[in-house]
Amino acid sequence: MSLLLKVKPLVISPELACRIGLNEAIVLQQICYWLEETTAGVDYEGRRWVYNTIEDWNKQFPWWSSKTVKRAISSLKGMGLLYVEQLKKNQHDQTNYYSINHVSPLLTDRDNLSPSRGTSCPNRKGQSVPLEQDNLTPSIRSTCPSLTENTTEITTKITSESVRQASPAQHTSIDYPAMLDAYHEILTEMPRVADFTDFRRDKVRSFWRKFNFNQDRWVAYLRYIKKNCRWMCENRPDKSSGRTWRKKNFDYLITERCYLSVKEERANDLPASGHARDITAMPSADYDIPDGFRG
């Protein structure tokens, strides 16, 4: 039996994939399907919402880990494309509800996201899920069936060629949760990022665009620093002044000064008898990652 389905694949726009990332486009299109083409969900304050846990979303994308699904949803939320709220104000019910921001600039070049053509959601016999708030009315199409036993089989009708042929992305696509995870997992000695503010997001976007970064280059950059620039990861006393040189942090890594000093190997650790390191010079140079970053 062929695994190539002739009907009801999950279809995404190549242009959307270029704009927001392939994983994000797949997840967003599937959420759109549940909102527009099924009776699942509720209407609340003029917006339609659908609910699910990360584990249950993961069942719809069995080729991914739950961590990948969580990253995609976090990325969509960070880009302002997805609303994630706990509509039930009940400490014992922390269910997340999801709704799409159709007026986002990332989506407004098209009239609407076209619904995917996945299989319809089977109703669970004898069960409806009313919400316990007076101003939260169920969908007019049906009571909301549980999605926890959804066994919809989904395939993707996506080819790398179709994505390459799409128009160039107008926005730098950055998986911010994945980028931060890499920083925390590789440079464990550096301070953790507790609040990823809009200011930091703008600095990252500018840094990645200027030096042509992507996730692979970012990981290679961090690994190079961990291996060759240990001084950035440690507090070190300065015997001559009696002061302590503090370890660097995330904000320092996304500066031109840090990048160029690492790229040109001026930030490499010196032998015990070495001379003082000069990382203040800003010579003109091309911005390609050196081969050493691959190690």
Image: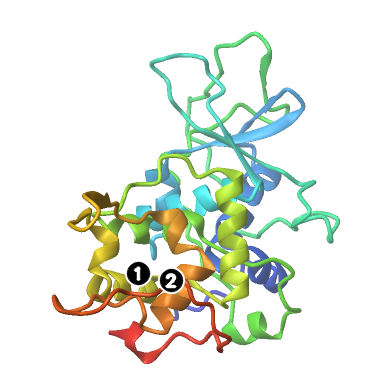
Image coordinates of residue 215 in percent, x first then y, are 46, 71
Residue 120 appears in view: no
Residue drawn at point x = 66 percent, y = 72 percent: 18
- Badge 2 crowding class, 10 Å Cα cut-off, few under 14, some 14 to 19, many 20 or more, is some
Q: Tell me if residue 232 comes above or below residue 140 in the rendering.
A: below
Residue with the mark numbered 2: 218
Between 199 and 57, which is closer to the camera in this rendering?
199
Residue drawn at point x = 64 percent, y = 37 percent: 39
Image coordinates of residue 61 in percent, x first then y, are 44, 59
Mark 2 → mark 1, Cα distance in angstroms: 6 Å
Q: Amino acid at mark 2?
A: Trp
- Residue 189 location, quadrant: bottom left
Disc ID at residue 46:
none
- Badge 1 crowding class, 10 Å Cα cut-off, few under 14, some 14 to 19, many 20 or more, is some
Between 96 and 241, which is closer to the camera in this rendering?
241
Residue with the mark numbered 1: 222
Q: In terms of secondary structure, where does tag 2 sit?
A: helix
Marks 2,1: beta carbons within 8 A: yes
Residue drawn at point x = 57 percent, y = 78 percent: 212
Q: Tell me if residue 205 comes above or below residue 120 in the rendering.
A: below
Q: Amino acid at mark 1?
A: Leu
